[in-house]
Amino acid sequence: MKLRKPYTLVTGLSLGLAILNPWVSPPRANALPVLPTFGETIAKDVPYVPTPQEVVDAMLKIANVNSQDVLLDLGSGDGRIVITAAKDYKVQKAVGVEIDPALVAESRRNIENAGVADRAEIIQQNLFNTDLSKYTVITMYLLPSVNLRLRHKLLRLRPGTRIVSHAFDMGDWKPNEVRQVDGRTVYLWIVPEPDKVNPEFLKEVKE
């Protein structure tokens, strides 16, 4: 598990150095730090924990992934779900979204080595800024709070879109199917018709 370090602002130290050393300019009063947005902080603080390959296969099987699908993996890590979907399930396209530049570079190398670069791609960006509407299957291994923040967007997708989560659910939005794989839980939701959606679930969750 790799946790990102929290952002720390040390303005007192900067000011102290300026007093001790006249060649160090003190910080300007109007020079405010550029801090990440709440969404960016959440996205960066999701720990990277690789999904075991047997769970990857279970996630793709529970969604009946096939050659007609376009798959998106949110928080794609080293790219293993994207690669498996492209190589073993022959999807039209598999796309991963990852914010960590080191993991983006690693997963792109893995895609090249697997020989699926023609149908697999990794995009470096915040998952909250991702257009979800183009995909028939969305997979994720995030955190409960992140799942809830995505829920209102997922429920607005085309009916029939399949959502698969490793380990964490979507609160009161009950899954269509749940499977256990070596002590791990895999959830499947199928986006319903708009008139079947609980209006409460369409409200944005900010925390």
Image (cartoon, rainbow, N blue to C red):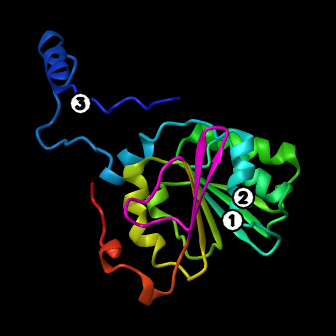
**Looking at numbered disc 1 in the image, what kind of residue is underneath it?**
Ala
Question: What is the span of residues highlighted in magenta in the rendered image?
Answer: 167-189
Instruction: Give the crowd class for mark 3: few <14, some 14-19, many >=20 residues within 10 Å.
Output: few
Quarter of the image where one finds residue 21:
top left
**Which structural element holds mark 3?**
loop
Mark 2 to mark 3: distance in Å? 43 Å
Q: Are marks 2 and 3 in contact (CB under 8 Å)?
A: no
Q: Nearer the viewer, mark 2 or mark 3?
A: 2
x, y percent for residue 147: 43, 56
Q: Are marks 2 and 1 in contact (CB under 8 Å)?
A: yes
115 is within the stretch colored magenta: no
**Which structural element holds mark 2?**
helix
Determine the residue located farthest toward the right in the rendered image.
115
Determine the residue located farthest toward the bottom in the rendered image.
195
* Residue at 79% over, 48% down: 111
Left or right: where 103 falls relative to 113 = left
Determine the residue located farthest toward the top in the rendered image.
20
Mark 2 to mark 1: distance in Å? 5 Å
* Residue at 63% over, 44% down: 104
**Which structural element holds mark 1?**
loop
Check the picture and name the quadrant holding the C terminus: bottom left
Q: Which badge, 2 or 3, comes first in the chain's sequence?
A: 3
Which residue does the numbered mark 2 point to in the structure image?
60
x, y percent for residue 190: 57, 73
What's the mark number on residue 131? none
